[in-house]
Image: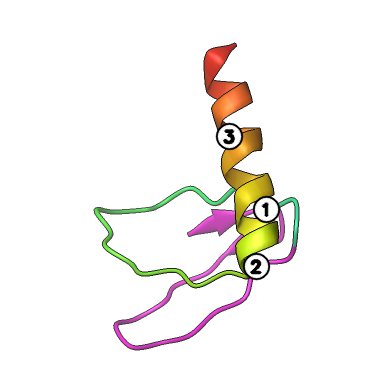
């Protein structure tokens, strides 16, 4: 992933944390499972939905 802090390579099974405000860019096809606190996750989804609407 490429973030504002540089490029990071993660391998299968690794855990990671991205601070608020991240906008990762995958460097290759990726499948992942993310876990987030419900309230904060809802805010993220709403923000992404508003941004996608333009």
User: 48 or 29: which is nearer to us?
Assistant: 48
> Whole-percent x and y of residue 25?
48, 48
Q: Which residues are magenta?
A: 1-19
What is the spatial separation of the Cα atoms under label 3 and label 2, in whole angstroms?
Answer: 16 Å
Q: Which residue is mark 2?
A: 18
Which part of the image, by quadrant, shows the C terminus?
A: top right
The residue positioned 68% from the left and 59% from the top of the image is 39
- Name, please, the residue furthest toward the right: 20
Task: Report the mark closest to the observer, 3 or 2.
Answer: 3
Marks 1 and 2 in Cβ contact (< 8 Å): yes
Q: Is residue 53 magenta?
A: no
Q: Up-down: is 15 above or below 21? A: below
> Whole-percent x and y of residue 37?
63, 70
> Whole-percent x and y of residue 6?
64, 60
The residue positioned 49% from the left and 72% from the top of the image is 35
Q: Is residue 4 magenta?
A: yes
Pick whichever of labels 3 and 2 is earlier in the sequence: 2
Image quadrant in which you'd find residue 53: top right
Q: Which residue is mark 1?
A: 22
């Amino acid at each position: 992933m490429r973030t504002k802090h540089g490029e990071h390579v993660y391998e299968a099974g690794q855990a990671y944390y991205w601070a608020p405000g991240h906008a990762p860019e995958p460097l290759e096809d990726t499948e992942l499972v993310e876990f987030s606190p419900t309230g904060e996750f809802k805010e993220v989804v709403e923000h992404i939905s508003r941004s996608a609407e333009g």
